[in-house]
Image: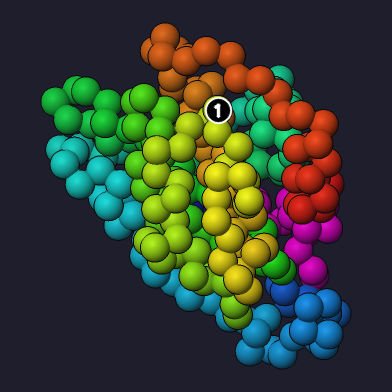
Amino acid sequence: MFRRILNIVILGSLSLGLIAPSAYGQNDQIWDEELNRFLTPEETGHEEIYMTPEEAARLMFPESDHIRPEVITLSPEQKQLIEERIGWHFPETTFECFVGETKGRIDGWAFIQNTIGKHKPMTYMVGVDPQGEVINVEVLVFRESRGSEVRKKRFNYQYQGKTAYDPIRINRDIINISGATMSVRSMSAGVKRVLVLANEFYLKPMGKSTTINTASRTDKGFLESLLGF
């Protein structure tokens, strides 16, 4: 299931121009404007696997006596609503989630996310508690040659306690990492999406959420520029 969802993300991103074709076996090379050169085969084929989704879910809910996977599917109306609230479009309509439970009580939800770093997607998990706050972020797979510092706790601890009402933006409530700006922006956008997904799918039905304002025109312009829309 995890691999199938990831393939959907990659194919959707290719069709939207978010991933250079060469990153996934085409002939064109990838030009890096910052380095002012084409990336080497070693750089384009770089992939660091840190943990499986099941291992990450256990880190999210170490005290839970049961962790179960489920997949949420967005209707066109739900997808449009979430895009309006986070300020950017995305190709996915399904998301894999793990639910932590203890004696029938929900401990939280952990969503797998795939968002584009500089050239290719990174895969990570974002955990949310029943109050709608981030409890943890863990990187599962990183595919860029630079920027993997986002997996370090000295950076991603900043997301802990964030809710769907926080900006989750560099220079607003997230401190950047020099040399990893695109990875930081990408992860921040994914964390925001998770919080809105959790709000819409889980917190609202439990009566624990209120309406989230849509992204401002400025935020939408910034995120659309960042993510290629």
Q: Position of residue 220 (x, y in %)?
A: 78, 37
Q: Is residue 55 above or below residue 213?
A: below
At x 66%, y 20%, the residue is 213
Residue 13 on the magenta segment? yes
Q: Residue at x 62, y 28 (%)?
A: 74
Residue on which the image places disc 1: 165
Residue at the farthest top position: 207
Would residue 97 be found to the left or right of residue 222 on screen? left
- What span is in magenta? 5-21
Could you tell me residue 159's position as x and y percent? 45, 46
Q: Tell me, yes or no, if residue 121 can be seen here.
A: no
Q: Quadrant of residue 25?
A: bottom right
Q: Amino acid at mark 1?
A: Tyr
Which residue does the image show at 44% across and 50% down from the upper left? 158
Magenta stretch prevailing secondary structure: helix
Location of residue 182 by image quarter? bottom right
